[in-house]
Image (cartoon, rainbow, N blue to C red):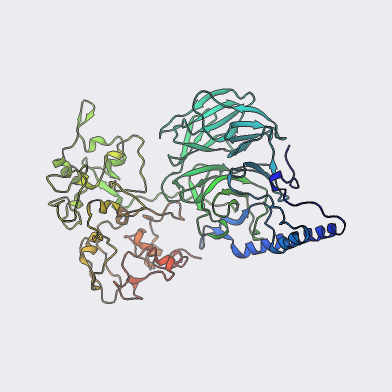
Amino acid sequence: MSSSVTEVPAFRRAWPVWCFGGALLACAWVAGLFVGGCQEGRHDLSARYTARVYPPAPQAPCVVALGTLRGAPPATKAQVELSMFLFGVEPPSPLAIANPTDLATRDDQLLICDNALSVVFRWDAASGELSEDRFHPSRDYPFAVDVAPNGDRLICDRGGVVRADATGNVYVEYAIEPRAFRPAGVLAVGDRVWVTNLAAHRIEVFDAASGKHLRLIGEHGRGPAQFALPRGLARTPDGNVCVVDVLNNRVQVLDQDGNWVRDIGRPGTAVGSFGRPRDVAVAPDGTIFVTDAFSQRVHAFAPDGEPLLAFGEPGSGAGELTLPNGIAVTTIAPQAEHELPPEMSPAYYVLVAEQLNRPGIRVYAWLGNYEPDRSTPSPPADWLVRLPDGKVGPAGPHWDAEGCTTCHEEDEGRFLPIATDEVNDVCLECHEEHEDTAWTHPVVDSEATGSGLQVPADWPLDDGQLVCLTCHEIKRQCSVNARRSDAGVKLLRRYDPLRTRSLCTTCHVDPDWTGSPHRQLDSEGQPNSESCLVCHKKEPEIPSDCVRRSEPKLREALRGCLTCHVRHWDYFPAEHVGRLVPPELRRSAKLPLAGDRIACYTCHNPHEGGLFPPGSELARRARSPAEAAYRLRADRPLLCLQCHEK
């Protein structure tokens, strides 16, 4: 049977009951102090962790972080001292969440799997009481949970997957033998039970009542209804099922027959992009929420899969996340550390299991009314390339599995390889600008030998000279399932977004080699033209008054920074880089633009401090050391207010 909040497990019974008479009065006094202590502790937490709204100003708030649910607060110092005086021991530790892994909601209750304590907690949202769900036989380290329509519990633990009634009696087991079975998530889908199987990269389907294995969905792969470590599951209002596909960095939507409907999300670091998605929940209005351990955020999507926003980033106060895992949605207002401002009316609440930083359940109020940006501006000229057949298109043939004949000749259905000494001629038909000898690495008469240079043996050269394929790896985009990624957009070899200079230092092995285009001053404090020419076609003139009047003659005005840098997380779902700036803003713009569009250097100043006089337009930099470390041109939100109104 389920225990009540007053029923303390044996391992927590540490307070001897040997007091009579007057001690009972003391107990009442202690109880009164405990109430006051809870209020005092809550006040301290409110002072320590400030509430946070998402997205940040000047945008309209959509999410409000209300703090963390952990269970009863620990005893205060006064309570401990009084307990020691009266009974000689410290008061018992209250029920508290230690390492939550998964969540499930039904009516006004929240079920929480705590893997560290090997229990399933039940949180009553109305009363705020935390208790334990007991199972017979007991469960060993439960890590995933769902609630069936009739109130039964579906539990994943070390022993497998079972079904228990509301009293905790286990009466159905879901298992497959002798095939490999490593369950990760469980979900009631009509009269079936779906279980994600990490070992076989698929979904096992069981009869809910009998536990009989009926069939499987999917296989290992990257295509539709194929998986690489499937994990969390969630139902949508229209009867479909969302499946977290961890290593493919997406959420797949399937119908109840297992047919692929669509993908949600993609690999990357922007809003709506994942690095390691963990779990998914769907709200009554169809909004989809996905926890991502890599970006340390919750990503929200419209019912059709369009990204809305992300929230919970590290360092954001009461709602910050470090290792988010399970997620659930409830319409009942939980008791949390902070109260919602009276003028805000949430549609529902999003609950997230945080495992590392102040472990517990983060509570967010979802205000709703947040529409996705569905604008589709035409791609800027910098993103277009001229193809040999005269057509103009984005990204060239490298992202198109049907575009092989653009570069390769075909013989009886087989694509012929391109000889090393012919590579440059083929590439320069589209990328003719790279023939310019002003490039740092032109592919004409560019020797790849010399002191401090060591080109890997598997990087092709043409008689000791650089060719396009020396640095660019094209083959990894020749798969039917190849996806364009934010990382390594230039198809650079050995590209590591966390170590952006690793490509350069692969060949430049001299320890004294710097190679950073952002170090524009030499040892004597004079401009270093060699650094300038990494980004500029010609060494730019520095006006005496340091007021920007002409184009900087950049090699790639819009996407040049992404040759070395990976796109960072962006509050704006459609991303800022490449966005068209309205004429009225362009006329009054205080930030540099790439023609009529936003570039990386619009917000970031790529120039080294000291290159321009302090206080000049070209030297603008954030005052906050934390913001200046990212080379921002002003502190946030002042930077945002350059374009956005309050």
When asked about the image quadrant of residue 113, the answer is top right
Where the N terminus falls, by quadrant? top right
Image x and y of residue 168, in percent: 70, 34
Relative to 49, residue 125 above or below: above
Image x and y of residue 243, in percent: 51, 37
Relative to 129, residue 206 above or below: above
Q: Work out whether residue 151 or residue 354 is closer to the camera in this orientation and state it.
A: 354
Report the number of numbered marks: 0
Image x and y of residue 560, in percent: 29, 56
Which residue lies at the image location 31% right of the left edge and 48% below the top edge? Answer: 495
When asked about the image quadrant of residue 411, the answer is top left
On the rendered structure, is 254 left or right of 589? right
Relative to 598, residue 263 above or below: above
On the rendered structure, is 646 left or right of 545? right
Image x and y of residue 473, in percent: 26, 43
Any part of residue 61 in sight: yes
Residue farthest toward the right in the current orientation of the protein: 21
On the rendered structure, is 419 left or right of 294? left
Relative to 221, residue 466 above or below: below
Any part of residue 108 in sight: no
Q: Work out whether residue 376 or residue 306 is closer to the camera in this orientation and state it.
A: 306
When asked about the image quadrant of residue 595, the answer is bottom left
